[in-house]
Image (spheres, helix red, strand yellow):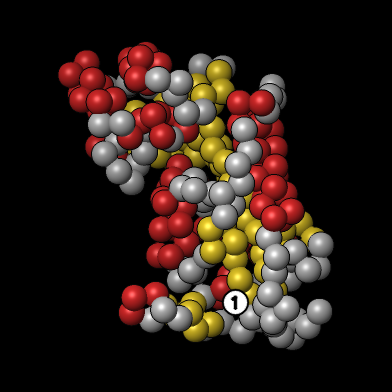
Amino acid sequence: MSDSLPLRLVLASASPARRKLLQAAGIEPDVLVSGVDESLVMADRAEELCLELARLKAQAVLTRWSPAGDQRTLVVGCDSVLAFDGEILGKPADPADATRRWQRMRGRSGVLHSGHCLIDVVAGRRAEAVASTTVHFADISDDEIATYVASGEPLAVAGAFTIDGLGGPFVERIEGDPGTVVGLSMPLLRRLLAELDLRITDLWTKVAPGGQTVEPLGNVRS
């Protein structure tokens, strides 16, 4: 393998929010959904659970990805859970579950943990870590909760809330990296890349109008 090969990042997630974070940071990822059944994975601590799920997602995609010979491929798996009142909260089971959660969370705080697992496919190296951010929820009304749950957004995300969508006004403030709450911490991704002797600027790309071509902007260090 040559270190001069252009880098390609594969995102092992169907989350449009994670993809948008990468795109906003100049990275155009390939997307391949892992298919991991999150309900089968158990752990005592939120940090352990999200990291294990991130690891499983990256590994699942790794077994299905066929890297091009003229590229150096990286796979990143991510998963998020909310630690609240001693419980680990992923996506709500249904609207009633989402409603009950918000009735408990409003006016209080929880910690959103996002696990990250980054694998260098050709080199066979891996770097992983968890980013954590404290979230302070607004003291919203029953009517606001009902309307938010009816939108369907809380059912699709860990902790039953977002900060980059309809749920943004219902979060008073956070302590930490906003990307962690969205599902992918860009500062942490930069540090994980450094563990693999890479720079995040090596992943910068320029997408032509319509997305027809991708021109690498960064160069991998030799």
The image shows residue 100, relative to residue 58, as above or below, that is above
Residue 155 figure quarter = top left
The answer to whether residue 136 shows anywhere in this view is: no
The answer to whether residue 42 shows anywhere in this view is: yes
> Residue at 57% of width from left, 55% of height from top?
32
Front residue of 51/150: it is 150
Type of amino acid under label 1: Asp
Q: Say whether residue 160 is left or right of residue 3.
A: left
> Residue at 40% of width from left, 16% of height from top?
97
At mark 1, the secondary structure is helix
In the picture of the structure, the residue carrying the numbered disc 1 is: 202
Residue 72 figure quarter = bottom right
Of all residues, the one furthest to the left in this rendering is 143
> Residue at 61% of width from left, 71% of height from top?
8
Q: Quadrant of the N terminus?
A: bottom right
Front residue of 221/3: it is 3
Front residue of 77/51: it is 77
> Residue at 43% of width from left, 35% of height from top?
157
Residue 153 coordinates in the image, percent (x, y): 33, 34
The image shows residue 187, relative to residue 139, as above or below, that is below
